[in-house]
Amino acid sequence: MTEHLTLIAQIPTGLITGLVAGFVHFSTLHRTVRLLANGSAAKALAMQIARLGLLLVVLLVLAKLGPWTLLCGALGVGIARSVVLRQVRVAAPS
């Protein structure tokens, strides 16, 4: 039987975990694209599978901890996506 966290623990646990997982996921996306652009399709595919697999495992664990943990985790991933994309846009040459 799975024990759910209390609501006060679910929200920060999900948000922090989602932020970390999102930053890892979207930060490594740049590396995956570079590998693909340089002709290393096998390495890019392996990295893509690893990225998606890691995010899937994190979200499954959050779902086991409770519904608010999962929702806040998804919110954290979305926030991390926005931050990483903003950083890439700033760093990209015009």
Image (tube, rainbow, N blue to C red):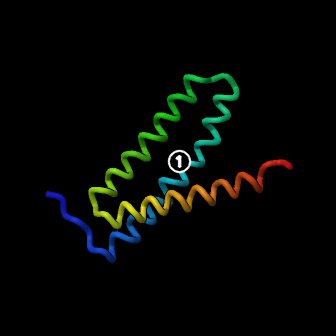
User: Which residue shows up at 60% across the image and 48% down it?
Assistant: 27
Q: Is residue 8 above or below residue 77?
A: below
User: What residue lies at 45% left-to-right and 59% top-to-bottom?
Assistant: 74
Q: Residue at x 57, y 48 (%)?
A: 26
Q: Residue 32 in the image: x percent, y percent?
A: 60, 36
Quadrant location of residue 35? top right
Q: Nearer the viewer, residue 94 or 43?
A: 94
Provide the residue designation for mark 1. 25
Is 91 displayed left or right of 67 in the figure? Answer: right
When asked about the image quadrant of residue 86, the answer is bottom right
| Quarter placement of the N terminus | bottom left
Instruction: Point out the residue furthest to the left here.
Output: 1
Give coordinates of residue 36: x percent, y percent. Answer: 64, 28
Q: How many marks?
A: 1
Q: Is residue 63 above or below residue 42?
A: below
Rendered residue at 69%/29% (across/down): 37
Looking at the image, the residue that sits furthest to the right is 94
Amino acid type shown at disc 1: His
Callout 1 crowding tier (Cα within 10 Å): few <14, some 14–19, many ≥20: many
Residue 88, percent across and down? 71, 51
Q: Which residue is nearer to you in this view: 52 or 27?
A: 52
Query: As drawn, is 65 to the left or to the right of 77?
Result: left
Q: Secondary structure at mark 1?
A: helix
Q: Residue furthest bottom?
A: 8
Residue 52 in the image, given as x and y percentages of width and height: 46, 41
Q: Quadrant location of residue 85?
A: bottom right
In this rendering, would 33 be left or right of 3?
right
